[in-house]
Every structure is written in C-alpha cells, then in structure tokens.
C-alpha cells in the first residue's frame, strides 16, 4: 500500500494548520503531523486521493490566506520507519499511557495501551482522541455495551474494555485500519471487542449504552440518524473530530435526532460533545 504526503507551509501556523487538518480530513486524509519547522504534513492512501477535491479546497482557501504546498509519493516501508520515529508516548490525565511496542512504560500506576504506530488514525496524539480518552477515564463505561464508530487503531475500543465495558463493537471502513485495529486488540489481550469492516450499514441490529464517534463533521452529519436508532434511551453519545466553531451546528443536528446536549470539552480549538438519547 502506497501513501501520498501533502506538505503545506502557511503563516501564521495557527490557526491555519488546524483549519487545513479539518479541511483535509473531509477529503480522505487520514493522518497529520507537523515537522520541526511547523509545516503541516498530511497523509492519504494513493488510491483514495482525489486531485479535484484538493484543488477546489485550496482554491477556496487561497482567497483567505497565502500558502505553498507540494505532494509526493511515499514508499510503504519508508513511511512505516518514519512514522515509528515520530511516535512518542502519550499520557492522558496521569491515568493512561498510550505507547508503541518499542517504548518502555512511563506510568507507574494506571492503564497502559500498546498501539502499533501504523498509518491508522488514533494514537492519542490528536486532540480529539485525547479528549474522548479523558472523558472515558472520568466516566468509566463499566458493564455498558459500546459502539465505536471509525475505530481507527482501536484505541478507544481497547480503553473501554480496560474500563470494564461489557461488549464492544468497533466499526471501521478502511481495510488497512481494520487489520491494524484487530492487531492492536490482540496485542492488548482484549476479548470483548469485535472489529467490523464497513460503515453505518455494519452496525449490528442491537442497541448500545454508549456510542463513540471520533469522525469528521461530514460523516457525523450522515450517521446521526443511525446513532439514534442504535442507542438505548438514556444512553450517551460522544462525538469529536471537529472544531469548536462547529459545535452549534452539530448540537442542532443532534436535537433533531432525539439527542439532548449534556456537556462539552475542548483542546486547542478541537471539540468533544456529549449527548443523552431522549
């Protein structure tokens, strides 16, 4: 599998790096990082790259800000080595560490999740993954049935099992991510997680106590009715993957699908919203 690396150099870095991350996530880009100079690097599978979509996006942004960009093809072997070299341990609220197999544990007490740092989204580095991890640590899903939509590496599903969730279904559309999630589930000795390939159509015909959706705004718009259908009355929905400026739009959409807004949290301009099913 080959990936493309898109580099964007924009001044000022903030908030524009975050804006481009949001834009590119909506046209299929999976992973993002900043180099030592602060330039944004975005990654997408070569087969999923749509030049027209990216060109249209850039034409709109050039009306607002000057920036330069370039794109190059990465060989898979070189990419994996580069990704590993950039993967640092993540510590969440001094209660959870997310580390790679080649890291030593850094947390004396608490939970530890080992994630193989491949191309898949969800290592805990991104603000949205961090926000949901933090929420789950403070409100453990003990004995709950959980649905994790867009599971990526499987890190959120794995955390819910460590926090004693009863049953977890983890849905992911990308084959590469499905394989990675299954590997990570096995690596963390989880037995109550089932990883399913697909989208909302693959949600089992059961109802859940807790649904997690760390996905971009466009996918959330499309999937809200499915969340409502598969949620028990009084159950909780956690969504992230968008900016705080998108909060009100998503709260209104949630209300239309029988969810009541309960709480929010944010980190570096990224948002997480929590709702209860009415």
Image: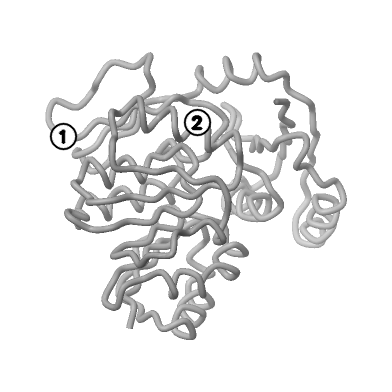
Label 2 environment density (alpha carbons within 10 Å; few <14, some 14–19, many ≥20): many
Q: Which mark is residue 44?
A: none
Distance between mark 2 and mark 1 Cα atoms: 24 Å
Quarter of the image with the C terminus is bottom left
Query: What is the x, y in percent for residue 265?
Result: 34, 62
Horizontal side, residue 132 vs residue 195: left or right: left
Figure check: 218 above or below 153? below
For label 1, the residue is 110
Tell which circle, 2 or 1, labels the residue nearer the N-terminal end.
Answer: 1
Label 2 with label 1: CB-CB less than 8 Å: no
Q: Which residue: 47% across, 54% down?
A: 149
Q: Which residue is mark 2?
A: 180
Quadrant position of the N terminus in the picture:
top right
Q: What residue occupies the far front of the structure in this picture?
A: 205
| x 57%, y 55%: residue | 199
Residue at point 79% right, 39% down? 69
Residue 140 x, y percent position in the rendering:
19, 53
Judging depth in this view, the residue of 69 and 123 nearest the camera is 123
- Decide: is 38 above or below 202: above
**10 Å crowding of disc 1: few (<14), some (14-19), many (20+):** few
Residue in the image at 31% along x and 73% along y: 232
| Residue 197 image-quadrant placement | top right
37 to 144, vertically: above or below: above
Which type of secondary structure does the marked residue at label 2 adopt? Answer: helix
Q: How is the image coloured?
A: one colour
């Amino acid at each position: 599998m080959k990936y493309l690396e898109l580099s964007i150099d924009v001044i000022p870095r903030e908030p524009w790096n975050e804006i481009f991350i949001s834009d590119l996530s909506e046209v299929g880009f999976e992973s993002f990082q900043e180099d030592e100079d602060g330039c944004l690097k975005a990654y997408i599978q070569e087969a999923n790259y749509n030049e027209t979509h990216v060109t249209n996006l850039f034409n709109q942004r050039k009306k607002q800000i000057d920036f330069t960009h370039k794109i190059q093809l990465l060989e898979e072997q070189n990419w994996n080595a580069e990704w590993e070299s950039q993967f640092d341990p993540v510590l969440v609220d001094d209660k959870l560490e997310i580390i790679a197999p080649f890291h030593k544990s850094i947390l004396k007490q608490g939970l530890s999740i080992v994630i193989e740092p491949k191309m898949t989204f969800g290592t805990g580095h991104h603000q949205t993954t961090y926000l949901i991890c933090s929420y789950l640590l403070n409100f453990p899903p003990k004995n709950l049935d959980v649905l994790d939509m867009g599971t990526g590496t499987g890190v959120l599903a794995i955390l819910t099992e460590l926090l004693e969730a009863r049953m977890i279904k983890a849905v992911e559309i990308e084959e590469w991510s499905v394989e990675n999630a299954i590997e990570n589930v096995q690596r963390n000795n989880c037995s109550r997680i089932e990883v399913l390939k697909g989208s909302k159509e693959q949600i089992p015909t059961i109802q859940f106590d807790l649904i997690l959706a760390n996905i971009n705004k466009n996918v959330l718009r499309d999937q809200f009715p499915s969340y409502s259908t598969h949620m028990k009355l009084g159950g909780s929905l956690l969504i992230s993957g968008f900016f705080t400026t998108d909060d009100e739009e998503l709260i209104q959409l949630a209300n239309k699908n029988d969810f009541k807004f309960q709480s929010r949290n944010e980190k570096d301009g990224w948002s997480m919203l929590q709702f209860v099913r009415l």
